[in-house]
Amino acid sequence: MLRKTRYWIGWCRRYASSSLTPSSGDIESGSFKSVAHSCWFRIPEQPQMKEYEILARGSGCIVRGKDDNLLWALVSAHVAVPFLFRNYFPQDWLSYVNEQHCKHTLYWETDDHHPQQVETGNIIWKHDMLDVAAFGLQRHELVDEKEWERLTRQAVELKPLSDWFGNSVIVQGWQVKGSVGSGQEEIVARSLNGTIRVQQQGIRYFVDTQPHQTHFGMCGGPILLPQSNHPHHTCVGIVEGLVPDANSLEHSSTQKEWKEFFQSIAGYTAFIEASVLIDFIDQIEKQL
């Protein structure tokens, strides 16, 4: 297994309520499909917490559900429920936070760069083994039909590849620049060209985006096929994290082969492939 403590892109501290400055002006109109995901929390038993405060930020993507009135937001679980990832975030005060204390927002921009945001509430579906979670978005819960249409246009189509190695892809997500919760942070839309190089354990693949690397905040963002050949925004997976240099990992002498493997893919982007995500959503919808 990969050591997420070193490269999973997420952070979790208690901050004051924050504003942010979004920017996606350098992305081609209509081509950027990632949403920015923010987790907020408020503990009513703490009288000094008058408003929700930012807990974590990441990225995500929208996919269609089983009918025309349902969409799903796929995001990183460590951003959606950081209090369940105590090996990532050891802060003692997190033990007082739970799902009922949280709400979530999704931010994106229209083709002409008008900002959009919806609140998803706190009903979270978390994968049992992988760092992915989902929120259901019901048509009747949104403000109006226009808001639903704008969100639907942001959706991608999950589709596994029959032949993975060597495929060109586009890695998308929202970089967080600055300190989360400072009120001065900026989220920036990022889109990186890459090539799928390696497979591990059948469910995790790696993308070479050199000379660039995925940025902090991009976990949960979609891995898309080039739109020139796939106009329906085909998504083959979501970002799991950035692979670190193997020398930063703690390995015993019996794990030399793993260290060599990690060294060969240092700087690559790990992602969870589409068939796993499709099965995840199918299992959720069977319980609805």
Image (cartoon, rainbow, N blue to C red):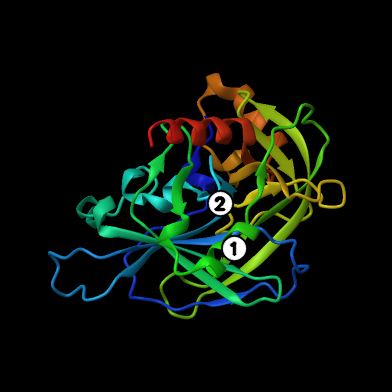
x, y (%) of residue 107?
Answer: 53, 67
Q: Residues within 10 Å of mark 2 (few under 14, many from 20)?
A: many
Element under disc 1:
helix
> Residue most toward the right?
228
x, y (%) of residue 253?
Answer: 54, 22
- As shown in the figure, which amino acid type bears the numbered disc 1? Glu
- Residue 244 appears in the rendering: no
Q: Is residue 121 left or right of residue 31?
A: left
Element under disc 2:
loop
Which is nearer the eye, 258 or 127? 127
Measured Cα–Cα span from mark 2 to mark 1: 25 Å
Disc 1 marks which residue? Answer: 149
Mark positioned earlier in the residue sequence (2 or 1): 1
Which is nearer the eye, 250 or 242? 242
Say which mark, if any, is on residue 219. Answer: 2
Say which mark, if any, is on residue 35. Answer: none
